[in-house]
Amino acid sequence: MIERSTPIRVFIVDDSALVRQVLGQFLGNHPGIQVVGMAADPLYAIDKMRRDWPDVLVLDVEMPRMDGLTFLRQIMAERPTPTIICSTLTEAGNDLNVEALAAGAVGVFTKAKLGLKQSLESIAGNLVRCIEEAAKTRPVARHALPPAEKKDLPVVPALLKTTDRIVTLGCSTGGTQALEFVLRQLPRDCPGLVIVQHMPEKFTADFARRLNSLCQIEVREARHLDRVHTGLALLAPGGFHMQLKRSGAHYLVEVLDGPAVNRHKPSVDVLFRSAARHAGSNALGIIMTGMGDDGARGLLAMREQGASTVAQDEASCVVFGMPKEAIRLGAAQTIEPLARMPILINQYGISARNG
């Protein structure tokens, strides 16, 4: 993680003069932040940024001339920079926000269409925290992958699809890209997966639909008492915890409300601890890129109950927080780069089928 003693240099790109004025004034008054520039659209922004490249970019997604999403993808391909998306909270906006997170944005904050000045003032404190966290990240150029083909497979009787082994996976900042990289490479006969990705409420369903459109396996937002089976990845819904349960020969998920754990809901620790209790040695636990320590103690519980456990290595993480803490606790049996994760999951599934 990057430690700093100098102000965080921020550039704001938004077509609203009011947004630029309010954010520029508020952020400019913060002792730990320096606003190095503002622009009304990406074409103006890129010329200014090249003269004084920022540490963090605050970017609107809906703008004239070049939309923010196109600009973000260009930035991430050419010079990856921690980027926070500034967006209106609408259904269409959710889709764009999910696309932006998948393209490499490290956070999203929302502004209201009505009462814009008051809305910006109310979220300014959260934005500062988001900028401080973003400055500690290390975005990487997007992994290029060909689109996975959706193949028509014969219908398999439900009993044969029961999975004796399951894969639990937890991630946070940088996880949207990492998950796409991993899941797109998994075959239809991979073990069932249960996943916690820290993401705002209302975003997870769109994110799951996006992944489902790209992957050979089925990916969807989990529902209460969904059964885990081969070729299915269940994503914990934002604003709820997800736990694994065993029911006879099957695994189910419980989607439950409750207080935040480690400041998160869903929490990776909640999922991992339930896997330790109910799956034991029949589980593979993987902790990937993310800030903080959520999931580290849960992964340790899994290892203590005989599960196989893996942490992502520092070099391939956007933020080496959650994996670092898991490694410090001795929770990870192995430390692997992101590129190895789909291979490990495939090998785990093959070993299960071969007994």
Image (cartoon, rainbow, N blue to C red):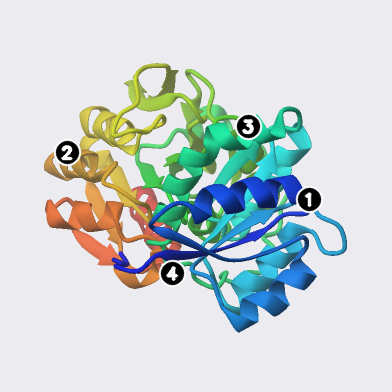
Is residue 189 visible from the viewing direction of this image? no
Determine whether the residue tagged by mark 3 lies in a helix, strand or loop: helix
Cβ atoms at labels 4 and 3 below 8 Å apart: no
Q: Earlier in the sequence, mark 4 or mark 3?
A: 3
Callout 1, which amino acid?
Glu
Q: Amino acid at mark 3?
A: Ser
Closer to the chain start, of discs 3 and 2, is 3
Pick whichever, 259 or 194, lies toward us: 259
The residue that disc 2 covers is: 301
In the rendered structure, which amino acid carries the disc numbered 2? Ala
Do labels 2 and 4 touch, CB within 8 Å?
A: no
Q: Which residue is mark 1?
A: 62
Q: Mark number for residue 339?
A: 4
Q: Could you tell me which secondary element the residue under label 4 belongs to?
A: helix
Q: Report the Cα–Cα distance between label 2 and label 4.
A: 25 Å
Q: Decide: few, some or many residues near mark 3? Use Cα within 10 Å; few <14, some 14-19, many ≥20.
A: some
Q: Residues within 10 Å of mark 4 (few under 14, many from 20)?
A: some
How far apart marks 1 and 2 lie (CA) works out to: 44 Å
- Mark closer to the chain start, 4 or 1: 1
Q: Position of residue 189 (x, y in %)?
A: 52, 49
Disc 3 and disc 1 in contact, CB within 8 angstroms = no
Q: Residue under label 3, please give it.
A: 119
Distance CA(mark 4)–CA(mark 3): 41 Å
Q: Secondary structure at mark 1?
A: loop
